[in-house]
Image (cartoon, grey):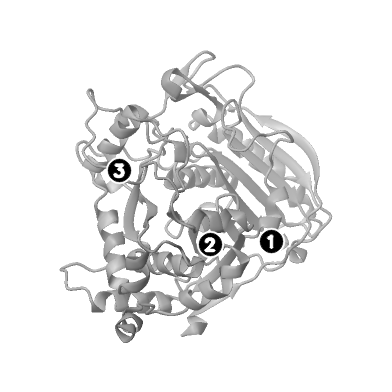
Amino acid sequence: MASWVEELHFPHVNIPITIAHLLPVSPAGPISAAPGDSLYLSNLDDIIGARVFTPTIYFYRFDFLNNSTRKSVMKTLFDALSHVLVPYYPLSGRLRETKNGKLEVFFEQGQGALMVEAYSEMALDKLGELTVPNPAWSPLIFRFPSEEPYKILDMPLLIAQVTLFSCGGFSLGLRLCHCICDGLGAMQFLRAWAATAKSGTLVTNPDPCWNRKFFQPRNPPVVKYPHMEFMKIDEGSSLTRSLWQEKPVQKCYRISREFQAQLKSVAAQANDQKFSYTTFDAMAAHVWRSWVKALDVKPVNYKLRLTFSVNARNKLENPPLKDGFYGNVVCLACAVSSVYELITRHLTETAHLVHDARIGVSEDYLRSTIDYVEVDRPTRLEFGGKLTITQWTRLSIYECADFGWGRPIYAGPIDLTPTPQVCVFLPEGEADPGDRMVVCICLPESATDKFKEFLSSVDQSRDEDVDRNN
């Protein structure tokens, strides 16, 4: 069973690159905004957790490129982006703050997205196995030399670095502002860009829909739920301290389909309710417990939080959301448990907490979230006693990123260590037919062996140990 959970290793490499050109990308034709215009962002768009750039990297094999094709990579991507920015024109604008700290998109002359042309004398095969996110790839995603952390105001909302390697292969490093789109919205945009590059003519299916006023707050606001996901909680446990005092390391594990099925089965055995757990319920519960146990969090009566994003598109019925909407339609679900309950109870009880938090995201909950932010806009990320899991397994990221040179050999994030309380569930890769998952998480080096041990064990309940000691 241990072979069902495999640790994936990545090399610590130095990637020398040369930045050749910074190229502003303007829409190829007239857009539905003029200089001086602005666009409304919903409270889901400019919530504190969305005020970031989401970095992703895409690698393409040299097999797909000959010398003449290689020279046209930049032009193909540039021209396609320019055409796609006509219907996706908000990505050519900038963000600014208005009253009460709320954000909006505004337009002026000389804006646009940014493409960066870069070269490396390395070959792709010198980067190691391109199947697992590696913080060493950071030079492949552009940052301005003096850029402040978390800067989003007056920045290009899409930054794309194309790095051409000596073997003929290349990488596409993207930074996309989360205020403009959530994961599904980003995939919709990426699919349009890729399809346009592949066909040579503009392709948008579905047509993009902005309409952020669909999520305007009610007047007066009606906050119906406590929204523990945003609550300011002083860190009264050792969890955050243990992560930040000792520099965390990024660890990745391949989880087989059989192990995922076994977890669901174990969770279901003790479930006397009339519902079934999803793979996510079981996996999130298992990873949360394993992480907390490995970190040996104290005191044991401290309340911990697990948060995760829930796509609320199919929850909206009155009225339904228009097809093609690419803004943020995610709610942050939150499960709460004491350390003691988390590490001693059966997996099914933790899975139950995750399940309840997940199905608790309704249209009413979404509207309450919007109103909560309107009344008390969070101004900083809250990490107290928290693990946040982000699920990328349903994003079709490999399918969306075929620009005409085949699917990428890797598509996904690079480095989680700047936010070590974030865990990501990734799809295995473009060649995997087996529904395997890669779990990426951060821990202090001293806790990694324990975490792997707990993660590889289906039933970690300490009930037997507790009974034996009483």
- Can I make out residue 434 in this image? yes
Q: Tell me which label, 3 or 2, sits earlier in the chain.
A: 3
User: 364 or 33: which is nearer to us?
Assistant: 364
Dividing the picture into quarters, in which one does residue 316 lie? top left
Residue found at the far top of this picture: 36
Residue occupying the point 41% across, 34% down: 378
Dividing the picture into quarters, in which one does residue 181 lie? top left
Q: Is residue 128 above or below residue 261?
A: above
Q: Tell me which label, 1 or 3, sits earlier in the chain.
A: 1
Which residue is identified by label 2? 441
Is disc 3 in contact with disc 2, using a CB cutoff of under 8 Å? no
Tag 3 secondary structure: loop
- Can I make out residue 321 in this image? no
Q: Nearer the viewer, mark 2 or mark 1?
A: 2
Percent across and percent down for residue 54 are: 55, 44
Q: Residues within 10 Å of mark 3 (few under 14, many from 20)?
A: some
Q: Residues within 10 Å of mark 2 (few under 14, many from 20)?
A: many
Q: Is residue 36 above or below residue 3?
A: above
Give left or right: position of 144 versus 397. right
At label 2, the amino acid type is Ile
User: 92 or 77: which is nearer to us?
Assistant: 92
User: 338 or 74: which is nearer to us?
Assistant: 338
At label 1, the amino acid type is Arg
Q: Which mark is residue 61?
A: 1
Q: Residues within 10 Å of mark 1 (few under 14, many from 20)?
A: many
Which residue is identified by label 3? 227
